[in-house]
């Protein structure tokens, strides 16, 4: 699944990947998606939690070519 | 200000007094037949009787272990026959998870929890053993132990013993003295009369065949004295702590982008956990410590493993920026208000350092 904005957060520890997501989701339009590639174990829980708290849609998880998980979020507001 | 009693409660004055007296009188081997040994044995028997009375169980159901963890390991593994199936709540303490992982013969299944951290008993099936804590050590939520209808139940009561009356419905249970104001190095193992429990570890020729090692007679008496005192004070302390925790829950929820987790009502009296979006948990613990407030955190960056709390993860709660506050028995309204006055600026400072001011990020 391709995203409209790819955020490379490999090597960043929590909560940096979520901070990046929060800072940059405004760069896509409503309806478009952001993918956060993260090696941090907490991202698997905190990105869905961020979506719930911020009223955005968590689309799901899909590995990047190097196997690192990418967490895909759709901007809905 | 110490706000981490869920990790370890300061020694209760009743325990200190008992400990000092028993250190001088309880040194001998309680299995011997001479006078000093009989003194030690008497102290041990008195402690067992006091714990049984405080918990509402039989004396022969009470064993003293070397820690709460040891009591968990013995209580749980003693119920699990070779090859048994075991279901456990996903939010059980790591002592339960490690004990189950150690036994490669067991078939182990985690039961999901809801957003409050309460186990979904519909998923329990027909296991031989169910491991279900009385109340969660991180978020305080009380579990429906007496509603489990399958298998033999092991109840980890380390977080709740002394603070809440024990429910019915378990075959074995565990408690930890330093969590109720007794000394460290004393755990309580309860095994119901008639329960199909067998010592899972090597036998020892001591006073009590369920446990091993030389009895910590002074520690056990101090633990019993603290438990008696805590149970006697329970109604008053519980009522006071519940009001203070309600106040913390309400005030923290006013801070933007904050999640207060756990059951707001059916919970431990003294404990509350919350998480702040975009906040580094380690920075938060440090920031509060610099302001004089000592709290715990379940965030990954505060753990030696760099893994987030499996409790918060299983609940689907935010795992970063997490703080657990747990009150001492004498915490006052003024203490809580001082903490609540310092918290918002601590959070805001960390968010600013991260390049985010409240309201600026999505």
Image (cartoon, coloured by chain):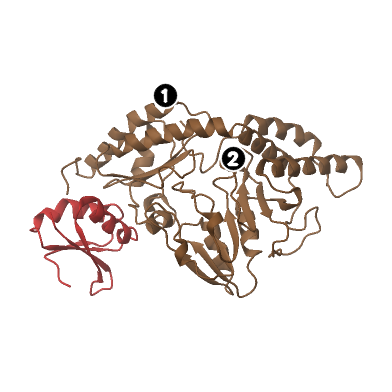
Chain colours: A red, B brown
Is any atom of residue B307 visible in this view? no
- Count residues near mark 2 (Cα–Cα under 10 Å), then give few for <14, some for 14-19, many for 20+: many
| CB within 8 Å, label 2 to label 1 | no
Residue at horizontal 38 percent and vertical 33 percent from the top: B247
Residue at horizontal 58 percent and vertical 55 percent from the top: B155
Number of marks present in the image shown: 2
Using residue B117 as the reference point, say whether residue B29 is left or right of it: right
Label 2 sits on residue: B180
Label 1 sits on residue: B334
Q: In the structure shown, which secondary structural element does the residue marked by tag 2 occupy? A: loop
Q: In the structure shown, which secondary structural element does the residue marked by tag 1 occupy? A: helix
Compare residues A35 and B111 and report the one nearer the observer: B111
Compare residues B277 and B155 and report the one nearer the observer: B155
Residue B322 against residue B236 in the figure, above or below:
below
Using residue B33 as the reference point, say whether residue B110 is left or right of it: left
Residue at horizontal 23 percent and vertical 56 percent from the top: A51
Using residue B265 as the reference point, say whether residue B25 is left or right of it: right
Q: Position of residue B87 (x, y in %)?
A: 52, 66
Name the quadrant of the N terminus of chain B: top left
Using residue B140 as the reference point, say whether residue B29 is left or right of it: right
Q: Earlier in the sequence, mark 2 or mark 1?
A: 2
Q: Position of residue B198 (x, y in %)?
A: 71, 65
Residue B324 against residue B65 in the figure, above or below:
above
Is any atom of residue B209 visible in this view? yes
Q: Residue furthest right?
A: B34
Residue at horizontal 59 percent and vertical 60 percent from the top: B153
Q: Position of residue B30 (x, y in %)?
A: 83, 47
**Marks 2/1: CA–CA distance:** 23 Å
Q: Position of residue A43 (x, y in %)?
A: 30, 59
Q: Residue furthest left?
A: A29
- Count residues near mark 1 (Cα–Cα under 10 Å), then give few for <14, some for 14-19, many for 20+: few
Chain to which mark 1 belongs: B
């Amino acid at each position: 699944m391709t995203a409209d904005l790819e955020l490379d957060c490999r090597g960043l520890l929590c909560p940096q990947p979520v901070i990046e997501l929060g800072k940059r989701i405004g760069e896509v339009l409503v309806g478009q998606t952001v993918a956060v590639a993260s090696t941090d174990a907490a991202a698997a829980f905190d990105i869905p939690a961020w979506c719930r708290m911020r009223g955005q849609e968590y689309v799901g998880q899909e590995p990047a070519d190097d196997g690192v998980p990418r967490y895909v979020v759709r901007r809905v507001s | 200000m110490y706000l981490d009693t869920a990790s370890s409660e300061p020694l209760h004055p009743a325990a200190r007094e008992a400990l000092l007296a028993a250190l001088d009188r309880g040194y001998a081997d309680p299995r011997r037949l001479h006078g000093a040994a009989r003194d030690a044995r008497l102290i041990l028997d008195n402690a067992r009787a006091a714990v049984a009375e405080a918990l509402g169980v039989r004396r022969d159901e009470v064993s003293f272990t070397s820690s709460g963890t040891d009591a968990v390991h013995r209580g749980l593994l003693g119920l699990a026959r070779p090859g048994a199936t075991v279901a456990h709540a996903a939010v059980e303490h790591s002592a339960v998870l490690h004990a189950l992982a150690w036994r490669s013969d067991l078939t182990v299944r985690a039961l999901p929890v809801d957003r409050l951290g309460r186990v979904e008993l519909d998923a329990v099936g027909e296991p031989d053993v169910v491991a279900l804590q009385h109340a969660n050590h991180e978020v305080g939520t009380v579990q429906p132990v007496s509603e489990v209808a399958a298998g033999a139940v092991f109840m980890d009561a380390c977080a709740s013993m002394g603070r809440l009356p024990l429910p019915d419905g378990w075959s074995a249970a565990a408690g930890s003295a330093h969590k109720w104001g007794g000394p460290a190095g004393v755990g309580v193992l309860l095994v119901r009369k008639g329960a199909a429990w067998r010592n899972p570890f090597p036998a020892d020729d001591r006073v009590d065949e369920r446990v091993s090692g030389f009895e910590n007679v002074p520690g056990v008496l101090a633990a019993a004295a603290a438990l008696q005192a805590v149970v006697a004070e329970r109604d008053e302390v519980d009522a006071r702590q519940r009001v203070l925790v309600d106040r913390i829950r309400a005030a923290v929820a006013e801070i933007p982008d904050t999640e207060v987790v756990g059951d707001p009502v059916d919970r431990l009296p003294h404990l509350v956990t919350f998480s702040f979006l975009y906040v580094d948990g380690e920075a938060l613990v440090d920031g509060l410590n610099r302001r004089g407030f000592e709290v715990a955190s379940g965030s990954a960056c505060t753990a030696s493993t760099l893994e987030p709390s499996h409790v918060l993860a299983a609940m689907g709660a935010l795992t970063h920026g997490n703080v657990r506050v747990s009150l001492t028995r004498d915490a006052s309204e003024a203490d809580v208000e001082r903490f609540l006055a310092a918290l918002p600026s601590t959070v805001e400072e960390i968010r600013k350092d991260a390049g985010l001011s409240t309201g600026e990020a999505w």
